[in-house]
Image (tube, rainbow, N blue to C red):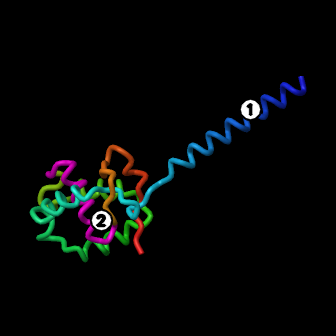
Amino acid sequence: MKNSMKMVISSVILLLGLVGCQTGFAQDKTVKDGVFTAAQVDSGARVYDSSCKTCHDMRFYRDTLKSWNNQPLLFLWETVMGTMPADNPGSLMLEEYTDVIAYILSENGFPAGEAKLDPDNGMESIHILTP
């Protein structure tokens, strides 16, 4: 009985260790990790020029990003989507809002990568980091 109890305890410890390792792999990303594509930046630039540029220059976003430091990128995306453009909030397509965020990040020195930025797929685990 003593040996079987040791085996059960050992199995539980092993299982907990494996679960802990797997959760360690699902680490949060930051905007410094290439979380959007160059194509999104190009598309976002066009939307920005037609819908955002008249009210906001890039200096506005440098200051704005500082206030979002350590926050999930999804929160910024939701705020922009819910409040912009000021004369017609929510009027852009979801993809356009996402591409504008990619453009803003790119213009503020964050790198493009291979993964497409997607508010329905992991954006809540991408954090904004500013210097």
The magenta region covers 91-110
Secondary structure predominantly adopted by residues drawn in magenta: helix
Contact (CB < 8 A) between labels 1 and 2? no
Above or below, 13 against 26 in this view is above
Q: Which mark is nearer the camera, 1 or 2?
A: 1
Relative to 113, residue 2 above or below: above
Q: Position of residue 109 (x, y in %)?
A: 32, 71
Residue that numbered label 1 is attached to:
11
On the rendered structure, is 24 left or right of 100?
A: right
Horizontal side, residue 126 vs residue 11: left or right: left
Q: Nearer the viewer, residue 21 or 93?
A: 21
Task: Specify few, some or many for label 1: CA neighbours under 10 Å numbering under 14, 14-19, or 20 or more.
Answer: few
Relative to residue 124, is residue 63 drawn left or right? left
Q: Amino acid at mark 1?
A: Ser
Residue lying farthest to the left in this orientation: 50
Dot 1: what SS? helix
Residue at the disc numbered 2:
105
Decide: few, some or many residues near mark 2? Use Cα within 10 Å; few <14, some 14-19, many ≥20: many
Mark 1 and mark 2: span between their CA atoms? 46 Å
Residue furthest toward the front?
114
Kind of residue at badge 2 = Leu
